[in-house]
Amino acid sequence: MMDIHEILKQLPHRYPFLLVDRVLELEKGKRIKAIKNVTINEPFFVGHFPHRPVMPGVLMLEAMAQVAALLAFDALGTTPGEKTIYYFAGIDGARFKRPVEPGDQLVMDVSLERMKSGIFKFKGVARVDDQLACEAELMCTMRTLP
């Protein structure tokens, strides 16, 4: 549905912080399904952990937030400009159920629960091989820079 070239047009993130490789499904204003291919070349694996590489939980949340941003931009029919920034506003109920390791494909399903007064609330679930890896409620907002 959206390849890396389209993702790069929508998100301001770049290596090493772009954590979405492809969008598989997108239902306007409702839900999105995207993937992050996790490789041993990820820079965070050098220190997390040298003896047993594991993707940090906060980066799984960040990956889901990036996917949520793609859903929000599509719902609004907008492409963020240089003066628009998309921020985390909150995270509730974050749970980590299995480690994510090199070679895993993180499949993220994010649904838009509510959009009110410029605050977006999403439900995000990330899986590896149909096993729950991470889930959380994410609140995000967009701001225009001066």
Image (cartoon, grey):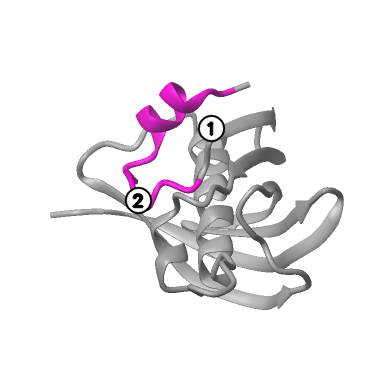
Residue drawn at the location 58% of the way across and 40% of the way down: 71
Q: Which residue is mark 1?
A: 74
Q: How many marks?
A: 2
Q: Residue sitting at 49 percent across and 29 percent down?
A: 77
Q: Are marks 1 and 2 in contact (CB under 8 Å)?
A: no
Q: Quadrant of the C terminus?
A: bottom left
Q: Is residue 57 magenta?
A: no
Quick one: label 2, few (<14), some, or many (20+) residues within 10 Å?
few
Secondary element type, mark 2: loop
Residue type at the position of mark 1: Asp
- The residue wearing badge 2 is 16
**Residue type beneath disc 2:** Pro
Q: Where is residue 86 shown, x and y percent of the image?
A: 38, 54
Q: Is residue 13 magenta?
A: yes
Q: Secondary structure at mark 1?
A: helix
Q: Of 115 and 67, which appears nearest the observer?
A: 67
Residue pictured at 67% horizontal, 67% vertical? 137
